[in-house]
Image (tube, grey):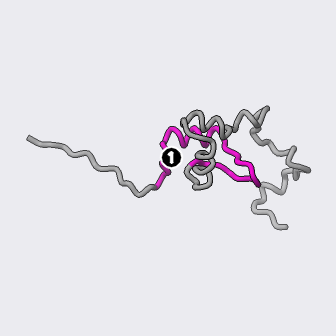
Amino acid sequence: MASNSNRFLSEPMPNSLADYAFPVAADPECCRITVPEIARRLKIGRLAVYDLLEQGIIPGIRLGRRWIITQYAYDHWERTCGMRLGTGLEAQPEVSVLN
């Protein structure tokens, strides 16, 4: 296998994923939000939350029958009301009124 850069030739290869320096929280559950918690925050039913996840309105990843929703992604979605960048809406220029 060819290396992409000579810089990597002098660095030792990690033996496993444990050798990589990933920023990992001590408790991965603290970085996730549950469907019932989202339902409480939005004041809607649990099944409505699953519907929003299925439609891609709320950001989440489906693993089998489970949904993984990160606290960061949900908080960002909640702050921006679900608006994504590049929606095609152009900012209107300010208008100066001259007398």
Q: Look at the image and give the residue range highlighted in magenta.
A: 58-86
- In the rendered image, the residue lying farthest to the left is 99
> Which quadrant would the N terminus be assigned to in this image?
bottom right
Q: Is mark 1 on a helix, strand or loop?
A: loop
Residue 9 at x, y percent in the picture: 83, 57
Q: Is residue 24 above or below residue 3?
A: above
Q: Does the magenta stretch include residue 81?
A: yes
40 over 98 or under it: above or below: above
**Is 33 positioned to the left or the right of 85 in the image?**
right
Amino acid bearing label 1: Gly
Question: Between 90 and 32, which is closer to the camera in this rendering?
Answer: 32
Q: Label 1, on which residue?
A: 82
Residue 86 or 18: which is nearer the viewer?
86
Q: Quadrant of the C terminus?
A: top left
Q: In which quarter of the image is residue 42?
A: top right
* Circle 1 residues within 10 Å: few <14, some 14–19, many ≥20: some
Above or below, 17 against 42 in this view is below
Q: Please provide percent x and percent y for residue 58.
A: 58, 47
- Specify whether 96 is left or right of 93: left
| Percent x, y of residue 54 | 62, 54
Q: Residue at x 34, y 50 (%)?
A: 91
Q: Which residue is pictured at 69% across the width and 38% down the height?
A: 32
Q: Name the residue furthest bottom.
A: 1
Residue appearing at x 57%, y 38% in the figure? 75
